[in-house]
Amino acid sequence: MGTEPTMPCDDDPAYAPNLLRLLPVFSCAHNGVRRMVAPLPERVLSYLAVAYPTWVSRDAVIEACQLDGTGDPRARLRQVCWLLRSRLGFDPIVGDRQRIGISPTCRVDHHAAQEWCRLLLEQGFATTVVRAVPNWLAPALSHPLLADWSWDDAWLQPVQARWDVLRRETLDHLSGSLLAAGRHQQALICAHALIQQDPLRETAWEVLIEALIHSGQRAEARAQFDRLTSMLSAELGVNPSDSAHRLIADLYR
């Protein structure tokens, strides 16, 4: 007999005592109170939070966050760490003389979402795993990573691209799996996120319409079908699929 998969922590990261949020933009909170972080410390924290739980060499942090300008770059990095400890109310960075990383006392929303994505993909969206998916995951998958980043940092773009691939691959299967599991509101969130990424993705529209029907929002389901019909006609010169038509036909039986 196979063993049950080990589920990641399903607690909402938003309620973690020490939270680093990267989806969709950076923020830092301690015991539910948002803490302001200056631009340079934000840059360092974001880089380390993306790498979490791995520690990174101090030299790599200095290079990636462009701390190697005037003066002693290692001293600048030490100053950043000191400022964070003194202003946040907790110590977000741990390490030794060579490497540093995010403290295990912190929760990183991006890392928590990635854990669930990987488990779902590894388990083939098994029903037992889908039923255990926490409510915070679908909204987290709706967001890009550090969407408002204003610095020209070479490390970030490939990380953003990998996250977009991972969340889209997860959403592709999760929306229908949630619908089949009777979790209609979560399926709605996933379908909306897929449509935002690809408005012509008809399977996502079908999940959206069916989830609305099961949620008792029959008029909204019809409105979304009409919206899909208009868009497909305007963009591709085609009509919705037979399966989408069947969903709407069931409304009038």
Image: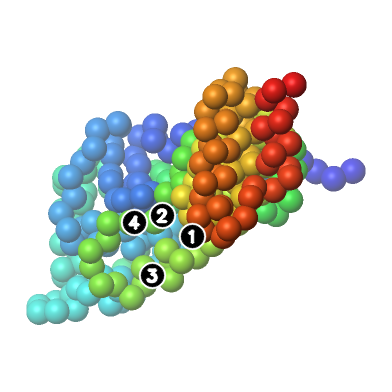
Q: Amino acid at mark 2?
A: Pro
Q: Judge by depth and name the residue closer to the eye, 64 or 193.
A: 193
Query: Looking at the image, how many numbered discs can be counted on the residues?
Result: 4
Image height of 174 relative to 45, above or below: above
Q: Quadrant of the C terminus?
A: top right
Q: Are marks 2 and 4 in contact (CB under 8 Å)?
A: yes
- Quadrant in the picture for residue 132: top right
- Residue at screen point 62% across, 31% down: 211
Q: Which mark is residue 157?
A: 3
**Which comes sooner in the sequence, label 4 or label 3?**
4
Marked residue nearer the N-terminal end (1 or 3): 3
Label 2 sits on residue: 144
Question: How far is disc 2 from disc 3 in space, using C-alphas?
Answer: 11 Å
Near mark 3 (Cα within 10 A), the count class, few <14, some 14-19 or many ≥20, is few
The picture places residue 112, in percent across and down from the top left corner, at 49, 47
Residue extending farthest right: 1
The residue type indicated by label 3 comes to Gln
Q: Which residue is mark 1?
A: 163
Mark 1 and mark 4: span between their CA atoms? 11 Å
| Residue drawn at (28%, 44%) of the image | 28
User: Alpha carbon of mark 4 to alpha carbon of mark 3: how far?
Assistant: 10 Å
Q: Are marks 1 and 2 in contact (CB under 8 Å)?
A: yes
Q: Which residue is mark 4?
A: 146
Answer whether labels 2 and 3 touch (C-beta < 8 Å). Answer: no
Q: Is residue 105 above or below residue 98?
A: above
Q: Are marks 1 and 3 in contact (CB under 8 Å)?
A: no
- Identified by mark 1, the residue type is Trp
